[in-house]
Image: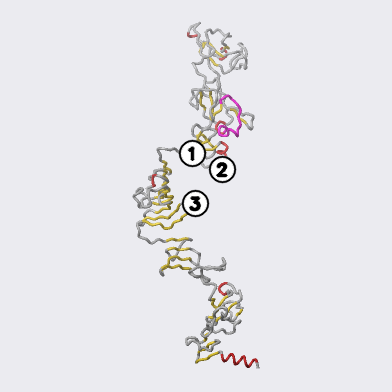
């Protein structure tokens, strides 16, 4: 009985007019434009609000035609599942069947008023197939991201670099791009700037008037030559930094302070100098694989040093140079020529220059510098014949001046030598032994030619018959300190 009553109640509240169906509690006819009217005749004001509950299904993907068997085109359902992957993925929401797949009608649309509830990596603006992403303004392409490699083109549909900007403008000058920083810190901007004509200047500028880099092809504002300038310019429309920065010519010439360099490196200034790299001796010697011609300033030795391909040498005075100084303390970079033994490693440049010519030192770790105290310097004969038989660094005894006319000019002692010291006045030439007669020398009268006629003389007594002889001779002199460059 209750079931029958319910059936009749349903029929009484369902009004069917022609092909229109209306469902309401008042028996009101359905709206003529609706095949199914759930609104007309119903009062949905609170607290009697009602809605339409669509069938809930758990789709396995956008191509799922099994969960709902043979879905009709435009069929609506509410999907409760998160399933599938990539282009076939589905998430909870309303879907309709378009004849081949389920299409979401909520949740994944990007709204022009903004979106919420998105997940980075899951929700994105882009494509799911191998197609370029194009952005348009006024229905004209403005930018493109290539699917093949991710290159971004602005003003071009075929970018050839990770960021390819093509500015098609005939303006007098234009900024290609600006990078602006604002806030409480250092505020400013950088711009890629280009001139109006083909081949005109282009630049990377800061705040519009401080250029980092610009080229000046065909731009007479700098000079007639083309090249790259790194430096300031006076305004964004007239760069004139050729003489205020670094100019690199197309020929490879580099100018600092000049827009027309005439050398591989041309430095021009009337207010400042050129400072070579400065370092200590230890730092200089620690330079790895120095090239020939490398130059530095040694702050320990107070001199300019260059590498000659095998060793370091001083550009002021090379190692081994002997100079005399009017003081008792050797200046920086010099050692006193007193015969001292010094380290072969600490004074490597000097050792390379003179070796063991003046003494082997301890034979392994040291060597000797020349001992020039109280000595006169004589030029190396080097084959001339004026002072034969001498080698660099060899010592030579003095030769006295002889003057004796006691027995007339024919008997003057004019031959003399101090190359062999005598042990006694009875020594015979030239087999004399080294001895201790002070100021000894050999001499002979002109009338006695045989070597056996040579006799020993000294400044205080004589073994022969000559008189008035001078045992030594020296010019007037001033004592200075001899030093050698190391």
For the residues bearing labels 1 and 2, Cβ distance under 8 angstroms? no
The magenta stretch spans residue 344:
yes
Q: Decide which of tag 1 and tag 2 comes sooner along the chain.
A: 1
Report whether residue 309 is seen: yes
Q: Quadrant of the C terminus?
A: top right
Where does residue 482 sit, x and y in percent of width and height?
53, 24
Q: Depth check: give the residue in front, 131 or 179.
A: 179
Residue 411, numbered circle: none
Which residue position holds label 2?
A: 288
Coloration of the structure image:
secondary structure
Residue 184, numbered circle: 3
For the residues bearing labels 3 and 1, Cβ distance under 8 angstroms? no
Report whether residue 250 is seen: no
Q: CA distance from mark 3 to mark 2?
A: 45 Å
Crowdedness near tag 1: few (<14), some (14–19) or many (≥20) residues, C-alpha within 10 Å: few
Where does residue 388 sit, x and y in percent of width and height?
51, 24
Crowdedness near tag 2: few (<14), some (14–19) or many (≥20) residues, C-alpha within 10 Å: few
The boundaries of the magenta stretch are 336-351
Where does residue 18 sit, x and y in percent of width and height?
50, 92
Which residue position holds label 1?
A: 276
Q: Depth check: give the residue in front, 291 or 447.
A: 291
């Amino acid at each position: 009985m209750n079931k029958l009553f319910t059936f009749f109640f349903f029929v009484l509240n369902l009004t069917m007019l022609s092909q229109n169906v209306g469902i309401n509690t008042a028996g009101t006819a359905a709206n003529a434009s609706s095949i199914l009217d759930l609104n007309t005749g119903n009062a949905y004001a609170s607290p009697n609000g009602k809605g339409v509950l669509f069938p809930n299904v758990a789709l396995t993907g956008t191509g799922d035609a099994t969960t709902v068997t043979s879905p009709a085109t435009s069929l609506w359902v509410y999907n409760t599942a998160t399933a599938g992957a990539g282009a076939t993925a589905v998430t909870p929401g309303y879907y309709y069947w378009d004849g081949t797949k389920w299409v979401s009608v909520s949740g994944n649309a990007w709204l022009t008023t903004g979106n919420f509830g998105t997940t980075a990596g899951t929700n994105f603006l882009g494509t799911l197939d191998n197609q370029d992403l194009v952005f348009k303004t006024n229905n004209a392409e403005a930018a493109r991201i290539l699917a093949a490699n991710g290159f971004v083109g602005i003003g071009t549909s075929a970018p050839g670099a990770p960021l390819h900007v093509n500015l098609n403008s005939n303006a007098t000058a234009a900024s290609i791009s600006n990078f602006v920083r604002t806030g409480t810190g250092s505020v400013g901007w950088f711009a890629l700037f280009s001139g109006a004509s083909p081949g005109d200047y282009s630049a990377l500028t800061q705040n519009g008037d401080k250029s980092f880099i610009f080229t000046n092809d065909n731009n007479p504002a700098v000079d007639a030559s083309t090249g790259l300038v790194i430096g300031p310019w006076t305004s964004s429309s007239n760069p004139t930094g050729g003489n205020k920065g670094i100019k690199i010519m197309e020929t490879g010439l580099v100018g600092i302070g000049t827009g027309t360099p005439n050398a591989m490196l041309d430095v021009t200034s009337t207010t400042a100098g050129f400072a070579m790299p400065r370092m200590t001796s230890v730092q200089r010697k620690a330079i790895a694989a120095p090239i020939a011609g490398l130059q530095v300033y040694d702050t320990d030795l107070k001199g300019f040093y260059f590498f000659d391909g095998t060793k370091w040498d001083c550009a002021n005075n090379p190692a081994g140079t002997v100079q005399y100084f009017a003081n008792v303390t050797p200046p920086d970079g010099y050692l006193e020529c007193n015969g001292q033994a010094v380290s072969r490693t600490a004074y490597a440049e000097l050792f390379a220059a003179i070796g063991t010519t003046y003494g082997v030192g301890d034979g392994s770790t040291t060597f000797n510098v020349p001992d020039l105290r109280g000595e006169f310097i004589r030029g190396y004969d080097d084959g001339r014949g004026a002072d034969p038989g001498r080698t660099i660094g060899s010592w030579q005894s003095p030769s006295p001046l002889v003057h004796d006319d006691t027995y007339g000019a024919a008997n003057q002692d004019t031959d003399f030598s101090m190359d062999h010291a005598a042990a006694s006045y009875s020594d015979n030439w030239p087999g004399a032994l080294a001895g201790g007669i002070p100021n000894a020398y050999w001499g002979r009268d002109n009338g006695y030619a045989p070597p056996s006629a040579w006799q020993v003389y000294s400044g205080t007594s004589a073994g022969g018959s000559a008189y008035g002889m001078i045992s030594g001779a020296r010019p007037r002199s001033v004592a200075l300190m001899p030093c050698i460059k190391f």
